[in-house]
Image: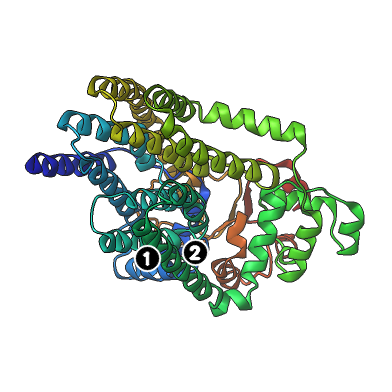
Amino acid sequence: MHKYRYFLLLFSAAIAVLFWIYFPICFENNDDQTMLAINSGMLTGVAAPFSFLSNIIIGKWIAYSFHLLPTFNWYSFYLEIILLLVFMVLCTYVLLIHKIALLKAFLFILILFFGFFSWAIITPQFTTIALFCSITSLFLYTLPIRARFRFTAIVTLMTIAILIRGDAYYIFALFSITLLYRFRKSPLFRRLYWASILAVSLVFITTQAINRQVRIYKHQHTFYNTEAIDIIAARPIKIEEDVLAQHHFSKSDIQLIQSWMVVDDAYLTGKKIKDIALQLKSTRNGDEVIAEIKKIIADERYLLLMYIITIIAIVWISRKLLMVSAINALLAVGLFGYLIVVYRLPHRITFPILSYLILSNLFLVIKSEAKPTLKMSILSVLLLLSGYKFYCVLQMAPLHTARQENYTSCINEINTHPNDLFIGADAFPLESMDAKASPANSISAHNLFLTGWYACMPDYQTMLERHRLKNLTSDLQHKDNVYLLAKIRLCYKRI
């Protein structure tokens, strides 16, 4: 049996690596592209570690790697390697399930790849990968190996998750509550649980402190600025004229920021802009919440269907297992509800969390004492659904190729006008960047500015200094060689 396990592990790694090599890959949203642009020196010509959304430790390693070999995309490489690590850990977990038949293990691994990881590979996103690390760490608590090895594996994987995105710690802590309830009568588990929670908490506090102590972040008020812009542009707010007048802001200023056009130094005033954002901060009303829920149901219908099937399977097999699933569901509903009301709930959060709920239920089913034929039937149904998902993933290949060609043609056009200045707003196809190619040295004249939260970064100030500018509004009023790549009429009117 052991040699078949090794074969399945090698097979799993091979299909994941080959899929990454041969499939055209695009990032899910603009956050990764922006961090890649900073780390690679795509805009300034100098690789910098200040990607901010990830820890400075990660940023320094990637920037140094780009400095040594700029033609290789180190940013995407590290994300995909970590995603492969998570996939292999989950495959190992499946293969170590007590008395699992080889065929069942094979079907389970196919479900993992077809239904979850194939999509994650072709649309890498740093938040999604960090959360996948978190949920995989939760599964390690029940891995049938010695407690000290589980402790080491959990802390290691969570350290990676926290370095990629600090918020992954909160997801880990939240859903670990279910495990504490499930194994509340086991002294050995409680010792492992509290020791690992303490260790992971120390890692979180330490890494966050390191990030907060970066001198240039303090000098340029990076934390205040990004928090303020995030509140205004990404969260529900209520625009009040008296608040704006008090701070000498107009409604047009707020609308410009909401369009991620952070192009004036008045929007980057640190504590002042954060105070404005906090006064405007609001919550969604009932109609808006319902609209968000409908959108999430439409976007995540595949994962929700998979989840419903696993719930039915648990009820069918043993209602005693239902309590564990119910606690996970309540925690997820509470988290989703909070984010919908006060923030936002994008796919990069729902995808890994719903995946955890599905896999957690499926592991409960496979480990139960149900008849083997019943387990095989459940796996077969889920494999059919995940196979259809994989078919849909394969249909993304020509779309990704077309998007990458569009991005390349846009960059080529910019390079043919080295004396002009381009501001890449929402009409610039940054999201279509080839996630496998290195963007270092792709813009020879370094004459492209990005908007969005990039304007809060030290890299943006470097670009302003390079072009002897203070901002991208009043300083460009009398320049004829500036092109704003935007679809927003407000921007044209305002700038």
* Within-10-Å neighbours for mark 1: few <14, some 14–19, many 20+: many
The amino acid pointed to by label 2 is: Ser
Number of numbered discs present?
Answer: 2
**Relative side of 159 to 233, left or right:** left
Q: Position of residue 418 (x, y in %)?
A: 50, 58
Q: Position of residue 115 (x, y in %)?
A: 35, 31
Quadrant hosting residue 359:
top left
Tell me: residue 467, above or below residue 450. Answer: below
Mark 1 lies on residue: 62
Q: Position of residue 485 (x, y in %)?
A: 61, 47
**In what element is the residue under mark 1?**
helix
Q: Using the rendered image of the protein, determine whether residue 42 is visible from the camera's viewpoint.
A: no
Viewer-proximal residue among 418 and 99: 99
Looking at the picture, the colour scheme in use is rainbow
Viewer-proximal residue among 283 and 234: 283
Residue positioned 36% across, 56% down in the render: 189
**Relative side of 313 to 493, left or right:** left
Mark 2 lies on residue: 51
Tell me: residue 139, above or below residue 312. Answer: below
Residue positioned 69% across, 47% down in the render: 342
The answer to whether the residue labelled 2 contacts the one labelled 1, judged by CB atoms less than 8 Å apart, is: yes
Residue positioned 41% across, 51% down in the render: 185
Quadrant hosting residue 230:
bottom right
**In what element is the residue under mark 2?**
loop
Reading the chain from its start, which is encountered first: label 2 or label 1?
Answer: 2
Q: Which quadrant holds the N terminus? A: top left
The amino acid pointed to by label 1 is: Ile
